[in-house]
Every structure is written in structure tokens, then in C-alpha cells.
Amino acid sequence: MRTLDLACHEFHANALFNSHGLAPFFACDSQVKAGDGSVSGSFDLDGELWTCTLSYQESNIVHPGEQTPQGTEFRIQQIREFRLKVARQITQDPIGKQSFTAHVSPRWPGMLGQKGDGTRVKIPVPKGFGEGVNVRLKGSNVEFGRYLTLLKIAMNEVGIAGRYFEEYHESSNIQDAERYVRVHKNKSGPIHARDGAIAAMGHLLEHDRKGYRKLVQNDDDNHGRNLPASTTRRHSMRGGFGRPSRRTPTRRK
């Protein structure tokens, strides 16, 4: 049996770290201030050249005062959140498709956020998490298993200890992880054809579920003229295709 090698595409996850409390957040704040708003670096990983930039963005997190509820001294006057941009060097990725961002924000029990209208809402923090940071990872065309490795190396390059991001908390979660296959147009033909790739995938699935399939077809000829619409059919997915329902074909005016 031959199968296709799928390529990693979109990825979105929340990686939470609490082994070092708020230290990663304070370190980001210190480095960005020292760099007058941003810090940049670059590194080589197994022959791959990467660039990284740490910057900041405004935050709606309500200031905890002199201390957090757990007693950690909070000397920062203005809370900001931080964004680490990591990308393959343009000489190796001229289209700029291999990259991700890591959005770093603090977490402590009982923290609040302020909406645009001034109302305050509670920001959820996992039970028993204590203090730490949430790193929201969002990228594309990077192997899923490499994100944390690249994150640690990139953080080191901008002056933040990579050890802060060694062990992620069990409440960390993946929101989206897409793999795709590119279809060669000259060899596949139209993927939306009646015998095209999408229809073929449907046939593979038709015996493992219940439900129905609804087909709506809208075609143009080679001169761009719209052809009469075909009958809409409803097929049972149990035990193969059922008999099509009887409906009168409609035509576009």
C-alpha cells in the first residue's frame, strides 16, 4: 500500500510554563527595555539559518499592584505582552513561508483583564498552576515537534534563558495542527471533477459513518458560459449509496 507524505502546515497551540514562575515574563520586559523596544538575533540549527526578534505590544491585563495575590513582588509599572517572531532566513526561504510567532503573557491566579468599555473580566488560569507564562504559538510550514526547540534557541539568542521553556505544564494544549498534500495540477486534473481527488476521498469514507451526502454542481463550459445545474441528490452513507431522491432539475436563467 502506498501512502502520501503529508507536510506540516498551520499550527496553533498554547504552551504554559510555571517551573520558574513569572521570571520569563520579567526577563522579556527587561530585555525589551534594554533594547529600546526590541531585540534581534539569528542562529544556525543543523544548517538551517533562522532569525528572531523580540518586541512588545500593549496589554489589557489589570495591574496587580505591588504584589501578585501569591505575594510575588511586581515592580513593573506598565504591563506589556511580548511577541517573539522566528523565521527562516530569506536566503533559504525567499517566499517567507517558514515562520512562527510566540506571544508571551503572564499568568497568576485571580488575574483580570479590562475590556474597551472599562469592564473587568477574569482571565482563566488552570487550577493549581500558580504563577507562570502562557506562550501562544502560531506558525506555518514548521514541523510540529520543532516548535519548542526553536522557541528555546530563539529565546536564548535574544537574551532570555531557554531553560525557562524546558517543561511545559500539563494544561498546555494544541488548538490547530494541519497537514496538507500539494496536488500537481497537470497530473491530477481538476480536483473538483466528478472523478477528482475530493470525490475519491469521499468514496474512502462512505462505509465508516452514517448520514448523507448532498451534491450541488455548478459548471461553466470552455467559453465561460454557465451550464444547466444538475439534480441535487441526497445519498445515504449507510452501506454504500442509497437511491437518489426524486427532484426536478432546475435551470439557471
Image (cartoon, helix red, strand yellow):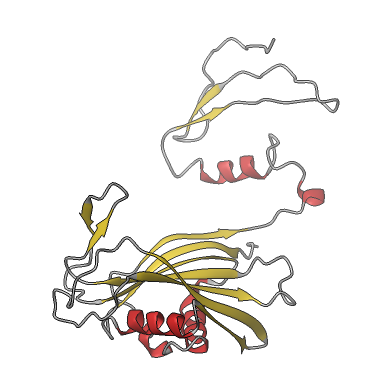
Quadrant including the C terminus: top right
Q: Quadrant of residue 27?
A: bottom left
Residue at image position (49%, 76%) is: 37
Quadrant including the N terminus: bottom right
Residue 176 visible somewhere in the drawing = yes
Left or right of residue 242: residue 231: right
Foreground pick, 142 / 94: 94
Residue 104 visible somewhere in the drawing = no
Task: Please tell me whether residue 188 is drawn above or below residue 58 in the rendered image.
Answer: above
Task: Estimate the x, y position of residue 72 in percent, counting from the top left.
Answer: 18, 82
Left or right of residue 40: residue 96: right
Foreground pick, 143 / 186: 143
Task: Please tell me whether residue 113 is drawn above or below residue 228 in the rendered image.
Answer: below
Residue at image position (68%, 13%) is: 252
Task: Please tell me whether residue 113 is drawn above or below residue 193 in the rendered image.
Answer: below
Residue at image position (64%, 58%) is: 181
Task: Estimate the x, y position of residue 232 in percent, counting from the top left.
Answer: 57, 21
Foreground pick, 211 / 105: 105
Task: Estimate the x, y position of residue 123 in percent, counting from the top left.
Answer: 24, 60
Left or right of residue 229: residue 13: left
Task: Estimate the x, y position of residue 31 in percent, counting from the top left.
Answer: 44, 84
Residue at image position (63%, 88%) is: 44
Query: Residue most toward the right?
Result: 223
Please count the marks in the image.
0
